[in-house]
Amino acid sequence: MSQLSRRLSRLLNMVPYFAANPGISAAEAAAELGVTTTQLMSDLNQLWMCGLPGYGPGDLIDLSFSEESIQVTFSAGIDRPLRLTSTEATALLVALRSLVEMPGTADPTAVQGAIAKIESAAGTAAGGTHAAPPVEPEDPIAATVRAAVGRGRALDLTYFSASRDAVTRRVVDPVRIVLMDNHSYLQAWCRQAEGVRMFRFDRIDAATELDEPARPPQEALDDSHVTDLFHDDDTLPQARLAVAADHAWVMDYYPMTDVRVAADGSIEASMRYGSLEWMARLMAGFGLGVRVLGPEELSVAVRSRASAALAAYSQSADGSTSG
């Protein structure tokens, strides 16, 4: 929807809103409508010039307004808020239900309340006859992170880093919560790394809101960081991997960079790791699905693990035969 269309929709809904709340102040109305007082007063001045074709007395919307009090004296027939079509209501319901499943994005109780209201207003055309599923209590960690973002407070996080195979504790300055690839992430300035990092909600083991304001530097507020899910830490060793087409799902679970997809669907990609032993164990577990192209020390470690596993199976088989 264009900016002009959004404003038109807002203007048309303001008339029944102010008709239902006569005498409300500009500050109160702006807070409820989610706009600034300046924007609200601009909208009211625009509304004053709207009305039915002809645009003469008795056709234009008439308002009496100041920052202290706003009142509709003539609505020009716009007495009810705009109605959602069944398609719009269904799309909105689907989006709201997906929010309930994404930790940290919204208060599940509030979302479920909005769903109930939309279903009641939209009726059966939007699926309103289906019983709403029970709302699960919000995860305490997700609630803490969401609250800190909303209040602009710093966070003390305990976080599992997949690339390092380690749990670390760090203080971060939250920027925003984003949804990518069906996961919720906290985008924040990490004071330890002195850079923007993305923290996946299901890997945050503990979160404590600190009694100090978040102060991310200006560079951290750049929207370009939103898609930078996995910062390439050049202090860590890097493996070059060949991923079979039927193991492409690996890319959804581990941070990969410099990805190249071949015509047959196979993939070459690079992955940082913090522990040679952990990386060798991970690669051995993928079998033929993922091959190590380098470095050599990692290839040797994977072959050693595979050989040890084969030897263990041979010993087991020999023991069974002799028994």
Image (tube, helix red, strand yellow):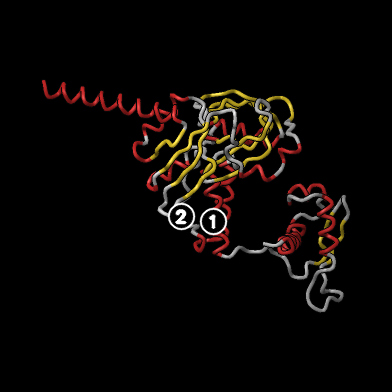
Report the front residue among 162 and 106.
162
Helix or strand or loop: what does disc 1 sit on? helix
Residue 102: tell me if it is visible.
no
Characterize the local packing of mark 2: few (<14), some (14-19) or many (20 or more) Cα atoms within 10 angstroms.
few
- Is 244 situated left or right of 61 in this image? left
Q: Residue at x 58, y 59 (%)?
A: 121
Report the front residue among 89 and 103.
103
Residue 203: image tag: none
Q: Amino acid at mark 2?
A: His
Q: Of the two numbered discs 2 and 1 on the same chain, state the one appearing first in sequence.
A: 1
Q: Residue at x 78, y 70 (%)?
A: 76
Image vertical order of residue 72 relative to residue 284, above or below: below
Q: Amino acid at mark 1?
A: Glu
Q: Which residue is mark 2?
A: 130
> What is the spatial separation of the Cα atoms under label 2 and label 1, in whole angstroms?
9 Å
Q: Which residue is mark 1?
A: 119
Residue 231 image position (x, y, % from top left): 60, 36
Image quadrant where residue 178 sits: top right
Report the front residue among 295 and 321.
295
Residue 241 image position (x, y, % from top left): 45, 39
The answer to the question of whether label 2 and label 1 lie on touching residues, with beta carbons closer than 8 A, is yes
Q: Quadrant of the C terminus?
A: top left
Image vertical order of residue 64 relative to residue 133, above or below: below
Report the front residue among 148 and 28.
148
- Is 155 situated left or right of 92 in this image? right
